[in-house]
Amino acid sequence: MANLTLTTLDLNNNLIGDKGAQVLSEALKTNSTLTTLNLESNSIGFNGAQALAEALKINSTLTTLNLESNSIGENGGVALAEALKTNSTLTTLDLWDNSIGENGGVALADALKTNSALTTLDLYNNSIGENGGVALAEALKANSNLTTLDLESNMIEVNGGVALAEALKTNSALTTLNLHNNSIGENGGVALAEALKTNSALTTLYLQDNSIGFNGGVALAEALKTNSALTALDLGYNSIGDNGAQALSEALKTNSTLTTLNLRSNEIEENGAQALSGALKINSTLATLHMSFNSIGVSGAQALSEALKTNSTLTTLSLSDDLIGPSGAQALSEALKINSTLTTLNLEYSLIGDNGAQALSEALKTNSSLTTLHLQSNEIGTSGTQALSEVLKTNSTLTSLNLGYNLIDDNGVQALSEVLKTNSTLTTLHLHKNLIGPSGAQELYEALKTNSTLTTLDLLYNLIGDEGAQVIRQVLQTTECNIKF
């Protein structure tokens, strides 16, 4: 008996293989209700993809097809491309990690020249290469409906990057382009920057890990002075250095549309941080700034802290592994006493120690905006944990606290457990990889008897042993909190 109501079917990770895909394909030829089909991780090869392609030539209701992490190969990609030439209903196609190769990429590009329904295409990690990238760029010159294209990890290199840049000069539909890890180099970065000077549709551009260097960074900064469409730019792992950061800072002083900027791991030091600080004192649109894995040091943290005292738009700041130490944490703490907009602060791997934790605790006594604080791997021990616990007695805004990979022992956990008996706002607490023993587990057990707000507690890789584990199992019988141990 045919099902006439099912609209979504999720068969993710069920090893249905080619035979299962073939059976489903037969059903799709007559089914008129299913709109979403998830076949991720199902060991589907060419035969299964070919069967699905034949079904897509007939089916007129399916809008989303997820074939992520299968093995359809080049021939499977070509078969699906043929189907797209006539199919007029599929809007989202996910071929993430399917080894479709250059031929599959070129075939899909050819289909995009005539297809008028597809809006999202995910080709992550498919080795389409330069030729695949160039072919897709040509397709984008004619296609007017694709809005999201994911080409992460496809080895399109410089020629592919330059070709896509040329396409962006005329394409007015694409809003999101992911080119993460494609080795487009400085020339690719410069070419994309030129395109951004005239393109008015693209809002999100991911260029992480592309070796665009200083010249690429400067060129993109220049483009941001006139571009009024881009809202998110990811330049992580590109070695733009202080000069690139300074150029971007100048652009941020006048740009009024960018809300998210990722500069993670870019060899930015004190001078770059100071330049960005100057920009943040003027810019009124940037909401998220990722600066992790640079080397801004204490001076850089102090400069950014000064900016936070007056900036009223930044909500997320990530400075993990930036060598800020206790003094940098102290500076940020002073800023948090005044700032009323920052909601997320990431200081993981910053070696702030107990002194830094104590300083941040002082800030949390008056701060009423911060909801998420990441302090993983900071050499925080008992005194730092006790200080944070004390402030949690009065702070009513912090909902997530990450203290994993520190030096918290049973004494520190005793302080945290005591505050958990009365705190009614914290929902997530990470204490993984610390020095918590059986007695610490017992203290947490007592706290969770009365606490009704904590939903996630991470105790993995501690020293609770069998005794502590038994106590936690008892807790699980009486609490809705998700405890990892």
Image (cartoon, rainbow, N blue to C red):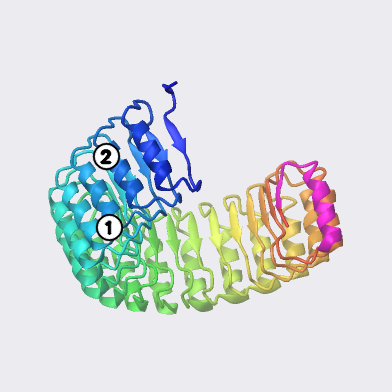
Residue 467 counted in the magenta span:
yes
- Left or right: 380 in relation to 221: right
Three-letter amino acid code of the residue under disc 1: Glu
Indicate the quadrant containing the C terminus: top left, top right, bottom left or bottom right: bottom right
Q: Is residue 407 above or below residue 457?
A: below
Residue name at image x 50 percent, y 64 percent: 318
Report the Cα–Cα distance between label 1 and label 2: 16 Å
Q: Residue 42 carries which label?
A: none
- Examine the image and state in which quarter residue 466 appears: bottom right
The residue that mark 2 highlights is 54
Per the image, the residue denoted by label 1 is 74
Secondary structure that dominates the magenta span: helix
Q: Is residue 267 placed above or below 42 in the rendered structure?
A: below
Report if residue 17 lies within the magenta region. no
User: As drawn, which residue projects farthest toward the front?
Assistant: 19
| Mark 1: secondary structure | helix
| Residue 119, x across and y down, in percent | 27, 43
Q: Height in image: 426 above or below 269?
A: above
Q: Reading the chain from its start, which is encountered first: label 1 or label 2?
A: 2
| Along the line of sight, the residue nearer the viewer: 122 or 380 | 122
Residues drawn in magenta: 465-483
Q: In this view, does 110 lie to the left or right of 73?
A: left
